Amino acid sequence: MREYKRRFLLVTIIIANAFLILVGRLWYLQIVRGDEFEKFSLDNRVRSIRIPAPRGRILDRRGREIVVNRPSFDIYIIPEDIQNTDTLSSLLSPILGIEPNTIKSKINIALQKSRFKPALLAKDINRDQLAFIEARKSSLPGVLIEVNHIRKYNQGTLGAAFLGYMGRINEDELKLYPDVRVDDVVGKSGIEKGWEVYLHGKDGYIQKLTDAFGREVKWSLFKEDLHRQDSVPGSDVVLSIDLDLQYAAEEALGDRRGAAVAVNVNSGEILALVSHPTFDPSDFIKGIDAAKWKYLLEDKSSPLTNRATQGVYPPGSVFKIVTAAAGLAEGVINSDTYFYCPGRYKFGKKTFKCWKGGGHGSLNLHQAIVESCDVYFYNVAERLGIDRLSRYIKRFGFGTPTGIELNEKVGISPSREWKVKTLKKPWYEGETIVTAIGQGYLSATPLQIAIMTSALANGEKLIKPRVVREVISPDGKTLARYDRQETGNIGIEGTIINIIKDALEGVVNEPNGTGRAARLDGMVVAGKTGTAQVVSNTVSTNQEDYKDHAWFTSYAPAENPEIAVTVLVEHGGKGGAVAAPIVKQILEAYLKLKKEGSV
Amino acid sequence: MFDRRLLKNFDWLFFFIVILICIIGLVNLFSASYQTGLSVFKKQLVWFTLGVVVAACISFFDHRSLERYSHHIYVFSVLLLIAALIFGKEVSGSKSWISLGGHITIQPSELAKIPLILAIAKFYQNDFEGGPYGIRDLIKPIFFISLPLALVLLQPDLGTTLIILLISGSLVIFMGVRFKSLALLLILIIGLSFPTWHYFLKGYQKERIETFLDPSRDPLGSGYNALQSQIAAGSGKFLGKGFKEGSQAQLRFIPEQQTDFIYSVLAEEWGFIGGFFTLLLYFIVILWVLDTASLAKDRFSMVLSLGIASIFFWHTLINIGMVTGLLPVMGVPLPLLSYGGSSLITAMLGVGIVLGIRMRKFPVTKEDIAL
């Protein structure tokens, strides 16, 4: 067929070119992009399964468990392996108590993300649910039970205010902790947040060989590709808190709204830290429900606030300690200076009342502290003036953070400069008078008052309060130890300190002392009451929200102080009647522990 | 009846190359199926044996008798296609299979390719006017092509429809068509596709066509298959992962890995070396068949060989193009390598016919006469 010769040549050329294209494509896939596809084929068949690391425990100073972990049985779905979405949804719905449509939409969302990646369906299912699903596992393809570690609060709500709660990691936190998985939980407040890097363990993984259907393949083939990495548990945080004392302090405060702080006056270690009302950290384990979260955020009682470190209150008469120290140190008064209290004090056009309407008559500093005479300190303040007084306010730690490694507020340490700077108004001398008895602009947290009290008790030093003693790794190594640290010196002569200390002992132990309710057998207690006005005296104090805050701050034993205890009851009324008995109860517990040799 | 000169002219080398491809196919199929009990491999071994016998027998059969019965054979193949539509077993949405009882199923659309070529070859043998042909001259072959085309489209099997169009179309174009008529034919095909779309195709058939034209409509289906196939081939790199060592194949990431995607198993386990060598063998076979066509003594043999070359070429190009991600995924098997009796027998029939034509292409030599 000679006439077709040219056509055959043409066809041959076309075919040769087509094969060249195929060879070229093969070269491109296997040689040019071979390494890339090799990696893909490895990713295809190797599936990493997380081995969750347990979080570190939180222990009290004697190693007793406060926050630990428990297993949580979580239900995951692998979209790839699900045979019938409808059947699975209607089967799981009654057991898990989730609407079938909700399950379906979760499956669909997971399907869009990845066919092979397990997606969480239900967290922490109970024993009955677990038994049901475990028994039907073979007829539930695509359903996976994974064991994770979640928080267990051995002591319930005890210490919740400073222990903190857990929550799903957010974007900002992801930048902070790049090793944490996107769907993992981290500490959101308190110790859990502050010591997150220590508490958080390192997840391990185990690689499994899977076929195209996501089934694990148990061949020896390709096994050399598989790795395993064990998880590293988080480290334990050992608190300075004593579980027994914490428990006693919480019981002593009871249902009252307020705070209690017990701190070692020499080391700064906090032995108990109470804020009430509080929250239940176990509510956060499965993810808190919206209604509860709204309540915690918006309720007037602000349960999420740690009142001991974040609650800012006028210190009231507790502050007379500072005024007295300033007066003595500046030579405005001495221990023999007498003032007469007629029950009120005139300054300019204004009249300032003493809490005792009938007046205290003539008294010296010791008596003025013991009976908490306001007029005596009005006199001291007028003679001191705000500029000298404000120096001592600062020295006792007001207006500066205590340095505790928890969220804290600082309150206000008023001065002439402060007022001009923040309120853009000049200082009125009348304001010096109310500052002397802890009213006016002055404010502080219960912790600040406790540290102030400690400084007086130890004679000179402002000490940084500590809640954590050390961090111990799972293999017993100490990773961090928090040592005593001084943040300031009150700089008051020992003789002056002793005059004030003497008076504080009198407050509790003398017949007319305002703090007699804190008197204890077996240990001499020294302290100072405070009844802080919330608003000016003219408003009726019957209304609950305007009732005075009750303060009592103390240290013991008076002769050789070890512990300072400060209690505040919001709108509680008189410090001596309301706060002092609470302090007594806490110190009683301390004394008992001391006798046992536990502290 | 039996002419000993034929045996002397038997093209052993060509036959050997074809057998070599078959053996590569069997080795490859062994690897692709030994995880699932080798039943597929064993069946293919039976088909292979049968195929060799068929090729050998056909080669000794004078193609002039094929010419005589080509219309009968064509009608029989069309009847099989109709039977597939009526009694057919639906597999993944297409009624392409007829069960012959037991485990044997045949695919009439595969088996219809040779009969169609026979019918076309017979047309050119009898109705030769020297071309190029006008559309009126081509009414007969157009009818021959349209009938199986429509029946396969109704199954629906888009891949096979397209391949039948390409195989027969390239024959018609090779033999010469007037430019005007060619344009008219193209317009006709496009014009016909609209009423077919609106009146003859059912919803699911349309859906399959739409997915075929736009694979991204079904990303977890054909898109996933195409990707896994490329991963398999690509990860084989230069030397391959080794026999039975291809993870994509052994862990079943390659879809349809015993049939349409068999070449990606080969490329994964034998690498560029194996993939290239196999392609080379196909190229040689196709050129060999083309050479047969150019040497043929009569027009019937020429068109017939050309058709067989066309079958091999289009199947190889489309299958490997699809497996390597150059072309969309469509169900087109790779001759001699893909598992499947109908496809293998069709290919071996073609090989047998070519062998037969080669044996008879040479003038009788003196030596032969001496025998």
Image (spheres, coloured by chain):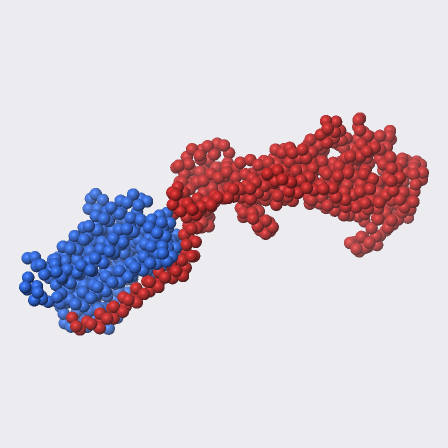
Chain A: give its colour: red
Q: A30 or A284: nearer the eye?
A: A30
Taking the spot 26% from the left edge, 51% from the top edge, the residue there is: B26
Residue displayed at 71% across by 36% down: A272
Q: Residue at x 29, y 51 (%)?
A: B28
Quadrant for the C terminus of chain A, please: top right
Which residue is nearer to you in this view: A29 or B339? A29
In the rendered image, is residue A280 in sight? no
Q: Which chain is in blue here?
A: B
Q: Say whether residue B347 is left or right of residue A167.
A: left
Q: Nearer the viewer, residue A113 or B349?
A: B349
Where residue A247 sits: x, y (%)? 68, 32
Closer-to-camera residue (A43/B138): A43
* Quarter holding residue A166: top right
The answer to whether A598 appears left or right of A436 in the picture is left
Q: Is residue A402 visible?
A: yes
Measuring from the top left, give residue B32's x and y in whole percent: 31, 49
Q: x%, y% of residue A312?
A: 74, 44
Q: Residue at x 7, y 67 (%)?
A: B366
